[in-house]
Amino acid sequence: MTTVAGTPGVGHTHHDDRPFIRKYIFSTDHKIIGIQFLFVSLFFLLVGGLLAMQIRWQLGFPNQPMPGGKLLPETMAPDGVILPEYYIQLVTMHGTFMVFFAIMPLLVGVYANFLIPLKLGAHDMAFPRINMASFWAALLAGLVMLSSLFVPEGAARAGWTMYAPLSARPDLSGAGLGQQLWCVAIILLGLSSILGSLNYITTVINMRAPGMTWFRMPLSIWALFITAILGLLALPVLSGAAIMLLFDQTIGTHFFDPAAGGQALLWQHLFWFFGHPEVYILILPAMGMVSDMIANGSRKPIFGYHSMVFAIIGIAFLGWIVWGHHMFVSGMNPTLGSTFMVTTMIIAVPSAIKTFNWLGTMWRGNLRFHVPMMHAVGFVAMFVIGGLSGIFMAATPVDMHIHDTYFIVAHIHYVLFGGSLFALFGAITFWYPKMFGRLMHEGWGKVHFWLTMLFYNLTFFPMHILGMAGHMRRIYDPTMYDFLKPYQPLNHFISISAFLLFAVQAIFALNFIISLFRGAKASMNPWQDNGLEWTLPNPAPHGNWAEVPRVYRGPYEYSHPDTTEDFLPQSQKLPGDPEPAAASAAGH
Amino acid sequence: MTTADARAMQPPFPAERGVDAYNTKLGMWVFLASEVMFFTALIGAYIILRFGAPGEWARPGTVLNVPVTAFNTFLLICSSVSMVKAYASIADGNQKLLKFWFLVTIICGASFVGVQAYEYLHLIHRGFVPSGVRDGSELAELVANGTLPGASLGLYGSTFYTMTGFHGFHVTCGVISMIYLYLTKVLPGKYTQQNYGGVEVIGLYWHFVDLVWIILFTIVYLI
Amino acid sequence: MRTLGMAMAVIAGLAALGAAGHWSGDAAPGGGVITGKVKFTGAKPVMAKIDMTDEATCKAKYTTPPTQETVIVNANGTLANVFVYVKSGLPASYQAPAPSGPVVLDQNGCRYHPHVLGVMVGQTLEIKNSDGILHNIKAMGKKNRPFNVSQPNVTTTPRTFTAPEVMIPLECNVHGWMNAYLGVLPYPFFSVTGTDGSFKIAGLPPGTYTIEAWHEKYGVQEATVTVTGSETKTSDFTFAAK
Amino acid sequence: MKWWLPAPASTFAGPIDGMFTAILIITGLAFVLVESGLIWFVFKYRGRPGQKGYYTHGNTRAEYIWTAVPAVVCVGLAIVSNHYWKQIKGRDSVPPDAYPIKVHAKQFEWLFTYPGPDGKLGTADDIVDVRNKLHVPVGRPVVLQEEAEDVIHSVFIPVFRLRQDAVPGMNIRSWFIATVPGEYDLACSQLCGMGHYKMHAKVTVQSQADFDAWLAKAAQGDIE
């Protein structure tokens, strides 16, 4: 394409007369789809949390009737006492819901949808209808997964990593239909992710507003863009693996059946080839949004923007060649283990760069501790712990001891909860006004932050100790091991902290819901941010801009010496700023 | 170029320079990247399983009917050629030839699916199923008298049906999409010399499916 | 408290043992009766000892080391745990009576009691864990829906079966030696030989029947018996050591 | 309750615990550096009205430093890790005179097969399928030959710092030298089904004489 001459700017901001169902249910508007993802994934976050509470009950109070457990059917918890097969369903479904239906859609489904067009100055996604299909496929996948908890024999029960042959053999796992539904839901989710990703990628490449060059894109968009590429290339591998698993379960193929020559490790290779990029899918967008929030809260340009971008790209690239570090003790060739160990050690470097750059951003800033900033700083503090604990398991000999123990559980929760979820609490608060036109309550937001931070650390930090002692993952009753018996008080303590951690999330939920109706009306740019989205009214209208905005600079020009204000929106023209080239080509 | 045409093939608003491809075309390329990964997973699994298989892998032609599939491959390659012809026709603004070559492509594609369905039925009749060889079938006898290596046939069935099945599924989706485009766009003459993005995009998909088949045919039928 | 529970479990287990000694399906009163003994010839095989050191609860329930129950030859030279049942011959119009009450399968001392048992289609099988330690019950039926459930403590799980099947193997994977066999039939004409090696199938309508004796190691034997009126016919089986 | 690794009982514990401690110190330093920096900045640079932040886009030199230092440290750790990894798990690391014990893992039991007097597995004098009891002589290399019947299991002996998955269709060797006599736990650490938590075995490390005596008794069928 050489010219875009004669194409007028498209404005949709005239009176919006679409019927309710097209506007809020079967909407093709990226913002509505983002909000739909938000509600749905918050629901699944709650489901995942409820499952986690049951896990913690069993570990803290083994073989005691769970409060409310009598509501569960006999096949799950007779007389309220959790059964071993229900316990392993709990750990499986907790992991599955949190990874695939809560954190991933919260980060990508919500914020890629909501932010990419808004921050790039596009009127919508490249393919709005495909975008809508992506949401409905994800919702369907979630409902299929949810329904699997209620089928006879119960849900999938081979861990969220679904290691074959346990997952492939109903006679060995004790679950037939539940395992199949897991595969079906994952295939649907893969479809949804691929549809979403191709949309995000196309939009970022082709639909940036004039002047929004690659290196003027906010880091959140960079992260979401790279995440979309990871998702695009990783999810089909998972889908392929899930299809093979489904065929093994249903039509008698032998992919993972060693008795007929199939290979048990094939599943692990396929799963982790997807799974490690997936881990970065779950953290990169959080890193990107935290960069935006930290720059905003520090009132300073981000420190080392380019190295931040290259760190994201580096992580994404290295993320493809580290999958074997999940398999050091799996029986994989030990020489291969050495290779994966080296790449894994190297992937720590870009994460370190990002951490130091965040610190550099705060250095000599003029820090504003609004709720999003608190969560962003909390993210950095917690991500550091999660990142550093990763080095223990990257060191292959040490991994021999801590693999598949609570040390790993602590690590993944420091990254996913301390990392991604803290970033999400911040992001939800930060972009809430642009979604709903109101602000979440500041005071309650801070209370929620401090209580979450406290109970979160009380819950997950002691898990490192358990892991060092050798406490295995996914065991139903640790008290039957002599070497774990002395640690039961710690399990007890963790469970109580976990219940309190769950309970204080009610503050967030109530703040979220009440603010929808009673929150203070937000101004157009309540955080005094530079992003393009803050030049729109609240909530942002369908079609976003009547006139496509022009971009004159990068997104982090805070405390610019030439301005009196301490922020300088990307679309604000200063004297001497040249007009973007593409804009003049458009012939306005 | 009129405004309407431009909208179809270019972003309908001023934008920073992206790549030299309109959204749908770029989107298709991106989608095909994900398809590559999907088939990579299937083919990768096949390679790993075949190299690690217990005993000998069935020699080409002992289970599968190679000549029939070779003909089918020829059909699919023809359809790719006719797709190029259709594209070239509309790029020249020739509606008539577009209609002809597009239809040829559909017919070749549909025939491919038909021949594959026939092949499946025939194989299942002979006793070759996804789980290996059906007891008491013609192939089971061959295994019993030692003409066919039996140990790896379970993997052979698993990989064969999964790979060719998903390829067939892709061809079927392509044929359905082409029939839809033919009825709604090609026949009513909605593609013009200035606006033929749909033909180009479905063509990309079709060439990809064709390419995958050539790889599959080589590694599954010939090697 | 715990001792009391254990004592009760032992009593329950013994009671179940007693009940298992000679158990047959409930049949309507009257009708023909087929009875007989299952004899055993040849050297009595030695059953392997079961190492229960790992499960103190179970080990404590035995004074002498427990052995496998694959072949149990009675003192009178007969074979126990043979499932004898009417394989065919019932008129198509035959209406089986409703099963009366549940059948109990007890897991006590890390063994199944009884080792071989039968239920009617639709009849409740109460699977009981008297040990209070984890057992799982894996039933790999081919005609009945397979199941694999666990019992981490003293509890009872009811199950019913939908289709006739001889036999469904039951096993516990926590204790590899634990296995049992379950026959499911649409009528009450089955019996398991006990400590005297005899079986009794009662309440048969007149007819000519094929009866089959099934043993987990020695396979099956068939016999044909004709019953007219409410007479008692005898049909003995003999299994030889292999 | 001990807030540290379990008491060591194999030769692997030395390097593994040493590496653990070293990494703990390195990461501990990084942790203190970052977190104290964070807290210091939070107080030092807290916002004051009417003030602006320091306008800078970064400092290449600083970025080089904090790229290079973690890179050097990580590569260093990788080299050390690899050194011990090759000793512990490397293809050729198993001592040729290691005493072989076959481990057959199935839902939810460990069955150990000991070579008889001839010291070789797969011969007639093997003591087969000893359930949930692993006896090993102290101070002598032992190699476990792991196989799984149904699903993936994992041999985990915390005091030995030993973990190796047992995968169906594979025969995986895993060796160690026990150093301290005593009774320890062996646990399955790979989710293998509903009885996973119950799949454990007792490990008895004993002197060669005691071990031989036990083995002789076991050969008689007296495994208790």
Image (tube, grey):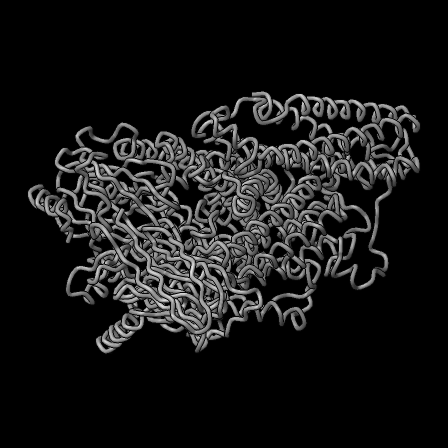
From this view, report whether residue B37 is shown above or below residue D192: above
Quarter of the picture holding the C terminus of chain B = top right
Corner quadrant of residue A561: top right
The mark tally for this picture is: 0
* Quadrant in the picture for residue D118: top left
Where A512 sits versus A38, above or below? below
Tell me which residue sits at (56%, 24%) in the image: B62
Between A248 and A202, the residue placed more toward the observer is: A248
Camera-side residue of C97 and D33: C97
Among all residues in the image, which is located at the extreme left? D209
Choose between A173 and A453: the one closer to the eye: A173
Residue B71, placed above or below residue A36: above
Q: In this rendering, is residue A486 above or below D24?
A: below
The quadrant holding residue A440 is bottom right
Asked if one can make out residue A223 in the rendered structure from this viewpoint, the answer is yes
> Horizontal placement of B201 versus C210: left or right?
right
Q: Position of residue C110 (x, y in %)?
A: 27, 62
Left or right of B17? Residue C49 is left
**Residue B88 screen position, x and y as percent:** 84, 23
Q: Is residue D154 left or right of residue B73?
A: left
Asked whether residue A380 is in view, the answer is no
Residue C91 point in image, percent of width and height: 54, 65
**Residue in the picture at 16% in, 43% down:** D136
